[in-house]
Amino acid sequence: MFVTAGEVESALNGGVRTMLAIVHDLKVTFDRNGSWRVTGGRLWRDEDWKPEPIRLQPIQYRYTPNLG
């Protein structure tokens, strides 16, 4: 699952309670009328989410070159 740096920062230092919610196990089909249909699904949530550093993994960096 991906979360932004801003979401992590807000959860840790934003001074507000943060909930993390994940909807999973959805079944997505395309019906004969050309419409998408979504059924099922389960909700997992952490009502007072505080990201644990050991569970965070850096996967992207922003690099600003000196084009001087």
Image (cartoon, rainbow, N blue to C red):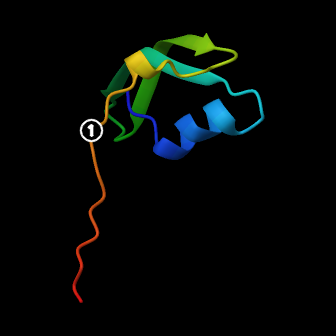
Q: Nearer the viewer, residue 27 or 14?
A: 14
Q: Is residue 1 left or right of residue 22?
A: left
Which residue is tagged 1? 59
How many numbered discs, if any? 1
How many residues crowd around disc 1 within 10 Å: few (fewer than 14), some, or many (20 or more)?
A: few
Position of residue 33 measured from the top left corner of the image (x, y, whole percent): 36, 38
How far across and down, in percent of the image, does residue 9 sit? 58, 39
Pinpoint residue 20: horizontal percent, then vertical percent.
59, 23
Front in this rendered view, residue 23 or 54? 54
Identify which residue is drawn at 22% across, 85% down.
67
Write the residue at 77% across / 35% down. Answer: 15
Tell me which residue sits at (24%, 89%) in the image.
68
Q: Is residue 12 above or below residue 39?
A: below
Q: Quadrant of the N terminus?
A: top left
The amino acid type of the residue labelled 1 equals Ile
Judge from the rendering whether residue 45 lies leftward or rightward of residue 32; answer left or right. Answer: right
Q: Is residue 41 or residue 34 the one in the foreground?
A: 41
Residue situated furthest bottom in the rendering: 68
Report helix, strand or loop for mark 1: loop
Residue 32 image offset from top left, x and y in percent? 31, 33
Res 35 quadrant in image = top left
- Vertical position of residue 47 compared to residue 11: above or below: above
60 w.r.t. 20: above or below: below
Q: Residue 53 lies in what quarter of the image?
A: top left
